[in-house]
Amino acid sequence: MLSVISSAQVIQPPRNPNTAALLARMDKAAEALTAKVIDWRRDIHQHPELGNREVQTAAKVAAHLKSLGIEVQTGVGKTGVVGLLRGNATGPVVALRADMDALPITERNDLSFKSTVTTDYNGKTTGVMHACGHDSHVAMLMGAAEVLSSVRSELHGTVKFIFQPCEEGPPSGEEGGAKLMVKEGVLENPKVDVIFGQHISSGTELGSFTYRPGSVSAENDIFRITVRGKQSHGAAPWTGVDPIVTGAQIVMGLQTIVSRNLMLTEHAAVLTIGAFHAGNRENIIPEEATMIGTLRTLDTTMRNTMYRRIREVVTNIAESAGATAEVSISMEDAMLVNNKELTAAMVPTLQALAGTSNVVLVPSGMGSEDFAYFAQKIPGFFFSTGARPKGVKSNQVAHHSPNFQIDETSFDLGVKALCHLTVDYMEQKVKK
């Protein structure tokens, strides 16, 4: 259930007249950039790139930042781009982050800038699509960089623009994403004080923001199960051990863990099998079946219980069928936790920008977000910007679907939010 902060609780950001005038000028600059931001987004959307392969996107970003006179570092976390904008006055270092990678999804939308890119992914030919809005994140941060660079002489601090690759997870056998960028020192030299990130939302009303202090999104573990049986002729299954039937029983058995072993009144959890592969011919029972899936939890004790039960269910069902099974589980994303003090300090900025009733407190979600690795190291505030097309239901344009769409008029508010948060935070620190 969503709860809206009442107007009586609004605390206006502590702005002096000079800051208010600065923000008004920045807003005009952002509005003048709207068409440009949309063009950038459409170009990136039409030329999507998977994680750790964002070469063209990174080149576009780097060229833009350099044209603004921003210090640029490329190749951070494989294909990441980092820009540094130094204001004329001393103050905190504020990081703004956007993710750049697309997904292995074939787009269904009938758009003039529809993606027709294809690639080989996990042995299958598939389309490539920005089906989660990362193209818009990049475009909005490029817009914020242009606005903020135009007022650098009035900034009381430094802005670090982080264009991050591989948020959706690295290819097998590779490192990537926020975790790798942190490992390579993206939050140092100069040391970052706070970081802000936003996510466009096709399920949230246009003109609104959603946020949550504390836990925002789930821990994301990925697992792989390999079932080994005995190959035989499809006409004589009794001469072998069928890993497909065994695997199907395992899939159903795993679904009882959440429904029968977890106290769901305390915390939510999700277990999903995303792929099941076995065999290559209709009359051959194969020797092996594999499946991969994701585990989402909001509580470490619950996570440990699920780890144990997954192994027990898989190995015991396999043994009962005369097969064997191996399970490997690894953490993909940590739980994203917004710093409560920073969130409380910055929510009034969003309220002043969008209106109090349009800034909505939401429950924790079961999605994952590797912004978590930045927020583990320094105070972070991650929020969502509404972009549901008018007259469209959320499930018709859902994230990670071939039909994902957003209303591009949301970009103006997104660019302004990044700029306002930066300036308001700097002013708060200067006053202390």
Image: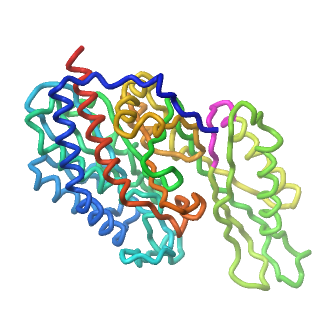
Above-or-below relation of 138 to 430 = below
Above-or-below relation of 401 to 17 = below
Query: Residue at 82% of width from left, 67% of height from top?
Result: 245
Query: Where on the picture, by quarter, is residue 229?
Result: bottom right
**Color scheme of the displayed model:** rainbow
What x and y, as percent, mark residue 326? 70, 54
What x and y, as percent, mark residue 124? 54, 75
Q: Is residue 191 left or right of residue 370?
A: left
Query: Residue at 72% of width from left, 36% of height from top?
Result: 305
Query: Residue at 68% of width from left, 58% of height from top?
Result: 273
- Give the position of the C terminus as an image quadrant: top left
Does the stretch in magenta take in 338? no
What x and y, as percent, mark residue 55? 28, 64
Query: Residue at 44% of width from left, 75% of height from top?
Result: 119
What x and y, as percent, mark residue 407? 42, 60
Compare residues 184 and 21 and report the one nearer the observer.
21
Compare residues 212 and 24 and report the one nearer the observer.
24
Look at the image and tell me whether residue 216 can be seen: yes
Look at the image and tell me whether residue 185 can be seen: no
User: Which residue is farthest front?
Assistant: 8
Q: Is residue 394 left or right of residue 243?
A: left
Q: Is residue 220 left or right of residue 79?
A: right
Query: Where on the picture, by quarter, is residue 306?
Result: top right
- Give the position of the N terminus as an image quadrant: top right
User: Which residue is farthest right?
Assistant: 238
Compare residues 152 and 179 and report the one nearer the observer.
152
The stretch of residues the image draws in magenta is 295-304
Compare residues 106 and 305 and report the one nearer the observer.
106
